[in-house]
Image: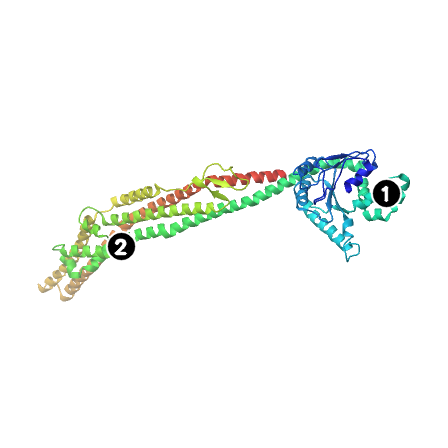
Amino acid sequence: ELNMNIHEHTHHTASFASTSSGSTPTHTQLHLLPTSSYPILSDLCLIDTPGTNAILSLQHTSSTLRILHDADLIVFVTSADRPFSESEKELLRTSIKSYRKRVVLVINKMDILERQKGEDHGEKTKLKVIDYVTEHAGDLLGARPVVIPLSARDALSVKLLYNKDAKNDSQQQSSSLWKRSNFATLEDYLSSTLTATTKIKTKLLNPLGVAEGILLDCQQEIERRLEELEVDVMTLRLLTSQTEAWEKELQTEVMDEFRLDVRKSWEQKADVVDRVIDELSIIDQFKLLVGRKFFDLAWERSNRRGINLSSSTFETQGNNQNSLEKELLSFVISCAERISTRAKSQGDATIEYLGKRPAIIGSGGKVSHSRHGVNRMVGTISIPKFHRLEDELRQAMTAAVQRAARHLRNDSDNSDHVYKSLRQNALVSALLCGSAFGPVSAYLLEALDFVPSLVAGTSLVALGTLALPLGNRNASKSYKTELMSHATKLDETLDTLFKDAIRRVAMQLSDGISPYSRYVRTEGDLLNDLRGKME
């Protein structure tokens, strides 16, 4: 009826229909209305577009969209009996809003609501419809629109009755049916809105509004993508913190434990002299002057008790091989294996976790994005294999142990060295104690008085008695100092090797996910740069 109302004033013979939703018949083409007979259209071009909710034609909406960007004002017509269909909402939300055009919303067919039973001419229902359209249009357009409820049928009836005769114009305006149609509100709005000044202003503002809409849409898109990318940024931060925690855990549970075991082995080896001395009684120590049978037994028992060696170690103990070196090498093999195993587990865990994030690991390790980053990542995610890590670490640690062992005496030489030291201490003690017979002999020969001879003899015995433990203590201390100096150097070397191994593992883990991390960084830089330019 709205189109027919305009048609009546333009004397156009083509058929028109409502652009509102529903099953009402609708024309299928854009309709340019002539302006010569309608004063309000004297310098305007009114284009009647097809309805967007028509069933028979899928081209209506696309036809409407083609002319939106050229419009100065959009008169959006919806129906009071079915306000704001889904297609109409979608058109407002996705198309009209983006063009930033001035929009007036016309609610047609208000006369239908007057036939509601039990109401005062449907006033309550009218208010509900107007409120519904106003609220939803404001949400869809981002601003409260102008809403004009009317009845084109009533207005058309009045216009047909008075046939737009100038002398009947006053009668038309005073007609109750005309007032009820509220069509004059729409005419007044168009007349006041589309003045020459406002039209010029609109022509200037329309491109700016379109540009502003595009910029705002771009800004929202950038913010949305940055928000999505933040998940990947947090993923990288989490992976970094997890790698750091893994390094600390590896240091504590593997490397520190290994170094402690190595240190204990050195200390146990250094304590062998003390254990030998504990095994030998005072008499056994003096028996060292006539043979080393008791010493060899004590040496073997001390080594068995002090160091947890394997049976194969003892089978070769008599030859030139160092038992401490063998034990350290067994620790090296175990440590290298544990570090390699943990490195592989960390690599697998990293890739598994990354595969659950928005960057999805596809077949062959490739990463694809279901969002805007799809196919923009260069390279593939790879799981570090650490094939050579265990071998290289074991070789480096073995070489360090062997270098330290070169400066050590073998077990046989150690035994000889300790035996000679203890035998020498026993000899000094025996000589001092034996020297006490000199003053006693001098007293018996009456060469010395009793008291001086007693004092001299007692002093020599005391010195001889003290010489043995003091000499043994010095021998043990000298042995420990020499051995532990090599232990300190080896510990420093192993610490360097461990730090290098951790650095290499962390580097390989980082290299494995570098395509993903590089994508996140470059995408973040790009979006932040675009946001800065937008602002």
The percent coordinates of residue 478 (x first, y second) are 25, 52
Q: Amino acid at mark 2?
A: Gln
Secondary element at image label 1: helix
Q: Considering depth in this image, is 193 or 424 the residue closer to the camera?
A: 193
Q: How is the image coloured?
A: rainbow
Q: Secondary structure at mark 2?
A: helix
- Is 98 placed left or right of 439 in the picture? right
What is the x, y in percent for residue 288? 14, 56
Q: Which residue is mark 1?
A: 161
Which callout, 1 or 2, points at the residue further toward the start of the chain? Answer: 1
| Front-most of residues 450 and 486 | 486
Q: Is residue 3 left or right of residue 304?
A: right
x then y, percent, for residue 410: 21, 47
Q: Is residue 302 above or below residue 231?
A: below
Residue that label 2 marks: 268
Q: Quadrant of residue 36?
A: top right
Does residue 290 appear left or right of residue 27 in this picture? left
Q: Amino acid at mark 1?
A: Leu
**Where does residue 132 sit, x and y in percent of width and height?**
71, 51
Characterize the local packing of mark 1: few (<14), some (14-19) or many (20 or more) Cα atoms within 10 angstroms: few
Quadrant of the image for the C terminus? top right
User: Are the residues flagged by discs 1 and 2 in contact, CB closer than 8 Å?
Assistant: no
- Local packing at callout 2 (Cα closer than 10 Å; few below 14, some 14-19, many 20+) is many
